[in-house]
Image: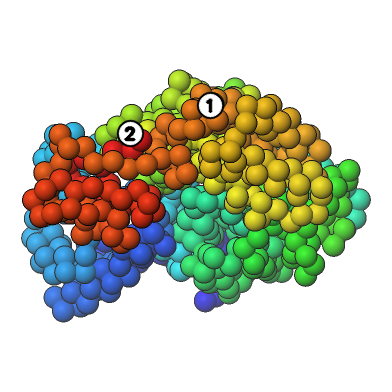
Amino acid sequence: MNKIHSLDRLRNFRQGIIDQRKKFAATMIICGGTGCQASRSKDVIEAIQNELASQGLTEKVHVRATGCHGFCEQGPILVIEPGNIFYCHLTPEDAQEIVSKTIQKNEIIERLQYKDPVSGNRILTEAEIPFYRAQNRLLLSMNRLVNPGDIEDYIAIGGYSALGKTLAELSPDAVIQEITAAGLRGRGGGGFPTGKKWTETRNADGDEKYVICNADEGDPGAYMDRCVLEGNPHLVIEGMMIGAWAVGAFKGYIYVRNEYPLAVKNTRIAIQQARDLGILGENIFGSSFSFDIEIARGGGAFVCGESTALMASIEGKVGEPRAKDVHTAVDGLWHKPTTLNNVETWANVPAIIHNGSAWFAAMGSKGSKGTKILALTGHIKNTGLVEVEMGTTLNSVVFDIGGGSSDGKAVKAVQTGGPSGGCLPVDKFHLPVDFDELYAAGSMIGSGGFVVMGQNTCMVDVAKYFLTFLQDESCGKCVPCRLGIDRMLEIVTDITEGRGKPEQLDLLEELGATTSETSLCGLGKTAANPALSTLRYFREEYEAHIHNKKCPAGMCQALITYQIDSETCTACGACMTACPYKAITGEKKQIPTIQLELCQKCGICRSECKFESIQVN
């Protein structure tokens, strides 16, 4: 590739790409993200490419393997342009029919289209699908336009033009003013004002400064940053470059957890392609600005999502946090001024510079501007990545976009903000996706993990699960976090196993408050949220475990027994066949009996019974 030494050269290069691609009669856009790859999307892509070749269409049809389209429940997804034809749940065996009918003859294959989940047979276009209709997809919509391994795709849609505008028209202070006026807040957890952070680094003493992208996304069930980075790495790179110009940095790092191999692969390709074109390196676009990026891989420790622990890890030290008496904006990586933002925060920067701060600030709520990407998982019909305007209610996210519970039963709660977030009941679903509103309710947006919970979820057991996770991930450096989480977990475990005492509830609240107030870093300060929020909103479940020795949800094994309902049992014998412990006995065509002394309460019999005859007492 010839290097792009000026903005005129960038514009000419972009126009050349656009002109070259006019030769294609159609574009087949296939999701190649990690989620769809698990559903054989790579095989689908290969099968389509082979079929196009066999029918002599390779030069007429462009195949674009992209990052995540968001609707993970329906993957692998294919969109065909022009026409915006939306196919889902593809298999490699569908390739021949798609090419022969849709590409060659413009015939729609009805069985591959999305059907209205209410009527069950009405075909919906992509714009009509409820999952997409209620979103505002500023960042995620770009994934389908870009093959992450092809920088030309990104440049063709205007990529790096915001960087060009920055270097040609905006001083560093002007960039920071735009980001501040936009109201952009960090998308990684605390929602700290981005412009304020950049200002502090800009004003810090020293000529050697750094910018870092935090892609150490450790929350169970969260994969927003992974999908943005693996689907559109150039967007993140451009955002970092604009931020580097603003704060006076010449080197950047993208810190990616080891469990994200596709994100690492695509980002490495993107960095090298940007270097080859001269977009990364010395005197970018003929200016005085020089900048380069290096990838640093983390070992998967949850605590390394914390800023000072992350920087220690980059330096080759143990990933432990340090006291916050001096901000990393002043004393960060190698004790140099450092700006750290997460993937989604950096990804918002180019659009703010391109469209202006007023455009971004017009979206969202009073204190939370723009959009937020959420990972919607759990007992929900439509799992996937969701991008909504800040201020959208939890009710809209769970029911309008998510479609409600996966089993048709009532939703009990949603946990927001990952393991350090809180669990909010249905009567709080009027609350908006807003940094301050959710924090006041005892939860947080966090990085954006939203786990929906159904009626069979025990909220005490949920607190136990997340406290167990946080205990494992605590670095143990400070006493409040190390011992506080241990003691809270002991109490919650006692309650789920029938040893709970009434006075332990007050002690749990006291421990939670002390841990939150005195821990060294954000992990410890938020570790009590799962226990405190479930105790605040579901206290009756804790009391039932303690006073009645019963688990209302029927999940805590120490407090339940199984029994067969003779009124509904058909004596089919499925439960006897399924039980791995031979705890269900009986004669053929007679109602069986559960031998309680042998029953391990694994629940397999319940899942196998089609008549819901296995009852929990």
| Residue 428 seen | yes
In the rendered structure, find residue 404 and report the number of the disc placed on it: 2
User: 10 Å neighbourhood of mark 1: few (<14), some, or many (≥20)?
Assistant: few
Looking at the image, is 203 positioned above or below residue 367?
A: below
Q: Mark 2 or mark 1, which has the lower sequence index?
A: 2
In this picture, residue 199 sits left or right of residue 601: right
Judging by the rendered image, the residue that carries numbered circle 1 is 547
Pick the front one: 124 or 440:
440
- x, y percent for residue 178: 67, 37
How far separated are the C-alphas under marks 2 and 1? 32 Å
In this picture, residue 53 sits left or right of residue 598: left
Inspect the image, locate mark 1, and give the three-letter code of the amino acid beneath it. His
- x, y percent for residue 294: 67, 68
Looking at the image, is 361 positioned above or below residue 48?
A: above
Residue at image position (23%, 47%) is: 593
User: 10 Å neighbourhood of mark 2: few (<14), some, or many (≥20)?
Assistant: many
Inspect the image, locate mark 2, and give the three-letter code of the amino acid beneath it. Gly
Residue at image position (45%, 20%) is: 427
Residue at image position (73%, 35%) is: 511
Callout 2: SS? loop
Q: Nearer the viewer, mark 2 or mark 1?
A: 1
| Residue 201 seen | no
Residue 55, picture quadrant: bottom left
Pick the front one: 337 or 471:
471
Residue 63, picture quadrant: bottom left
